[in-house]
Amino acid sequence: MARYEICGGNPLQGSVTISGAKNAAVAILPAALLVKGKCRVENVPDISDVRILLDILADLGADIRYEAPGVVLLDCTNIVSTHPNPELVRKMRASYYLMGALLGRFHKANVALPGGCNFASRPIDQHIKGFAALGADVDENEDYVNLTPGPGGLQGNRISLDVVSVGATVNIMLAAVLLPGQTVIENAAKEPHIVDLANFLNTMGAHISGAGTDTVKIRGVESLQGGTYGIIPDQIEAGTYLAAVAAAGGNVLVRNVIPKHMECITSKLEEMGAKFINYDDAIRVQSDGRLQHTTVKTRPYPGFPTDMQAQICVCMALAEGISRLTESVYETRFFGYCTELASMGADILINGKTAIVTGQKQLKGATVRAHDLRAGAALVIAGLVAEGTTRVENIHFIERGYERLVEKLTALGADIRRIED
């Protein structure tokens, strides 16, 4: 098993370039199933989730080539199977986007239920509701979802989601883009990667409007053609580096970002004492490591993202005073990483959906285990600021979503190594 060993105490200096957005890539790559011809996708992050997804598509029969680092050529024209490899599907959460893409292209799909980070119960009932509204018969058991056309066939429809769901919004968009008629998704998610998926599909010939608002309209087209598209920068990777500098101190230029996407994160870190300068496609973050308490409640975009909850919790653990962190998306997301932080000296009390964090002057190095992707990133930040050596185990979770993490942090002056046992 691999692990990270981190000797804390070094402020971060220099610049770091943010990779393509994981959450956009894992939606856009399955969307290539809908396209006749070659898709040239740029700014594809080299992370394990992307590699698994490309393996799934290749196993189905896609022609996949890397033109250059971060540039993938996909041609899914000759795929005929609607049953992706279940062992690969169960290795990642976003593999459920294959359901919508296969249903949209072939009007049927037989997909194993996904795996991935297990930090909370994340049902797919809203996905199923959307597929049924489009006319699919859904046969679901504990292992598989089997989708077939209902008696009236598949066609566009109006779908009102009971809760805001990124996954359901993406899956319905994928399923509906080639169906006759118009599909309207009400109470849709508004995250940047929803907009990025819509822009990709529109580049290939789709007619999607309203992405980024709570009402998305999809007017079905007969076919999509190949083209070139670049994935947006990763909002959460950028936020992780911003939080790391806020906690450890330093002066770092974070390149390849969309500052507008970062406002929900920078506003809170600025409230805690970090300083920011925005450029067209970069943000400079400066911090002396002395942070003030704050109050954060996670919300769907444009609110503070749940995927940054654990990282800002580390900042709170070092801030002067008592901070409150409320989770409104995944209620059980605190459990696991807060215990690990406590072993490093953090003072965190969980009260239902809220963590009450009393800031400490110093964290101490310890051996800790990542329980999921973002919790693992938070433990790395804690190691960067802790006294002594921190060993982070279960790093396969972290490498699901962070490209060249050790290389990037080392370039900023961090003392971090990847150890392979």
Image: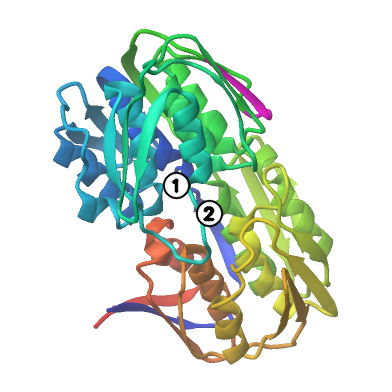
Q: Does the magenta segment cover residue 72?
A: no
Amino acid at the residue labelled 1: Lys
Around disc 1, counting alpha carbons within 10 Å, would you say few (fewer than 14), some (14 to 19), or many (20 or more)? Answer: many
Disc 2, disc 1: CB below 8 Å?
yes
Q: Position of residue 1 (x, y in %)?
A: 27, 79
Amino acid at the residue labelled 2: Glu
Tell me what residue is drawn at x 56 percent, y 70 percent: 378
Q: Residue furthest front?
A: 151
Q: Position of residue 268 (x, y in %)?
A: 77, 57
With respect to residue 335, does 298 lie above or below? above
At mark 2, the secondary structure is helix
Q: Position of residue 390 (x, y in %)?
A: 48, 86
Q: Which residue is mark 1?
A: 22
Is 333 on the left or on the right of 359, as rendered?
left
At mark 1, the secondary structure is helix
- Foreground pick, 197 / 106: 106
The residue segment tinted magenta is: 212-218
Q: Which residue is mark 2?
A: 237
Q: Quadrant of the C terminus?
A: bottom left
With respect to residue 363, does 49 lie above or below? above
**Disc on the earlier residue, 2 or 1:** 1
Tell me what residue is drawn at x 69 percent, y 88 percent: 362
